[in-house]
Amino acid sequence: MIDRMTPSRRPGGANAGTQRWESLLFCHWEIDPETLRPHVPAAMDLDTFQGRAYVGIVPFKMRDIRPSWLPRRLAFNFLETNVRTYVTHNDRPGVYFFSLDASSRLAVIAARIGWALPYYYARMSVDDSDDTSRYQSVRRGGAAEHRVSFRVAEQLGPSAPESLEHFLFERYLLFVEKKGRVFCGQVHHEPYDVWTAEVTEMADQLITAAGLPELGQRPALAHYSPGVDVEVFAIRDTGVMR
């Protein structure tokens, strides 16, 4: 039985840093678990909802980012877009990232060295000038682009436990392979205030750049959250070899 509530509780001790995630657009596509399985490390199990697996793209604003030792006045901001799916490791539910594009070279270098996460530098922009928001990203060298426009629709509020929304959004652990071992990182924040979203335009190359099959240019599900304040805790070795 997978315990989906314990990871949402704040771990003891001091955090390693804080940040704010703002204006998140969660786009999800359903994918055949057998098609997805070869793209996820063997040490991790696919996490499915009623037998269905999902791939997500999440563009958002990273704000007020700082490690715990850095003065607040020196915190920095950037844009990010990640491609993800959902996994379990030792029956703990979390996120597995196929890629993370960021508009900060410093963030890319730090995350690759410190967390072994597949970050890429990209030119990114966001436009919130009217009732339609627009994110755009072009990975360095033009290797992959992503463009999406959307409107916020109906407020759903915090996700109910055991719902699909809770399965997709309330993820507090990430798993990554590093030097042949599985590591786990944890974050803590209040539950997302979730809204439905209407995607009015999308052009994506990030999914296929990750080696996944083409899933279509419009997501099956689109949701929005205005944001959460986040505590980040140090990544830890799970003691499991690949």
Image (cartoon, grey):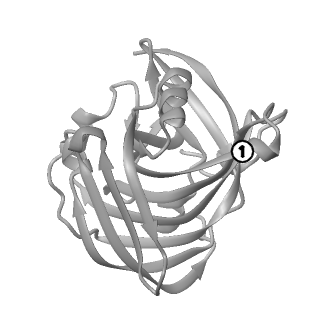
Residue assigned mark 1? 75
Question: Could you say which is closer to the camera, residue 10 or residue 66?
Answer: 66
Question: Could you say which is closer to the camera, residue 130 or residue 206?
Answer: 130
Image location (x, y in percent) of residue 16: 74, 33
Q: Is residue 156 visible?
A: yes
Assign a secondary structure to mark 1: loop
Which of the 4 image quadrants contains residue 225? bottom right
Instruction: Give the residue displayed 22% in from the left and 44% down from the top.
Output: 142
85 horizontally vs 116: left or right: left
Instruction: Give the residue displayed 31% in from the left and 34% down from the top.
Output: 40
Q: Which quadrant: the C terminus?
A: top left
Instruction: Give the residue displayed 49% in from the left and 27% down from the top.
Output: 109
Q: Which amino acid is tagged 1?
A: Ala
Image location (x, y in percent) of residue 59: 43, 58
149 vs 5: above or below: below
139 horizontally vs 228: left or right: left
